[in-house]
Image (cartoon, grey):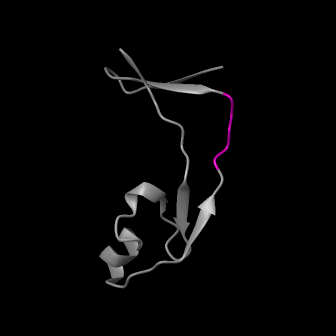
Amino acid sequence: MLVLLPEKKNLLRCRRCHLTIRADELGEGHCPECFETGGGKQYDFEEIAAIDRGKTRYRCEVCGIIVESN
């Protein structure tokens, strides 16, 4: 069975550790990776533009393979 994968959008990259995360996953607004490793709250992110490749992506629930189609 194939599952439609959502498009990547609203991605942010931490300017310190380079973690890439969706904006809606930030919760309190600071980088979770920097907080976990150093205890400091890092709020400096750069927005990453989503690349529209014109392809639809699916993942097989059985084997995990990702399939792209035009």
Q: Position of residue 55 (x, y in %)?
A: 63, 27
Q: Position of residue 3 (x, y in %)?
A: 40, 23
Q: Is residue 38 above or below residue 59?
A: below
Quadrant for the C terminus in the image: top right
Q: Quadrant of residue 52?
A: top right
- Is 51 one of the magenta-colored residues? yes
Quadrant for the N terminus in the image: top left
Q: Tell which of 29 and 8 is nearer to you.
A: 29
Residue at 39% across / 76% down in the picture?
34
In the picture provided, is 59 more to the left or to the right than 63?
right
Residue at 61% across / 62% down in the picture?
47
What is the tally of numbered marks visible in this picture? 0
Considering the whole magenta stretch, tell me its main secondary structure: loop
Residue at 58% across / 25% down in the picture?
56
What span is colored magenta in the figure? Answer: 50-54
Residue at 67% across / 43% down in the picture?
51
Q: Position of residue 64 (x, y in %)?
A: 37, 27
Q: Quadrant of residue 33?
A: bottom left
Q: Tell which of 31 and 63 is nearer to you.
A: 31
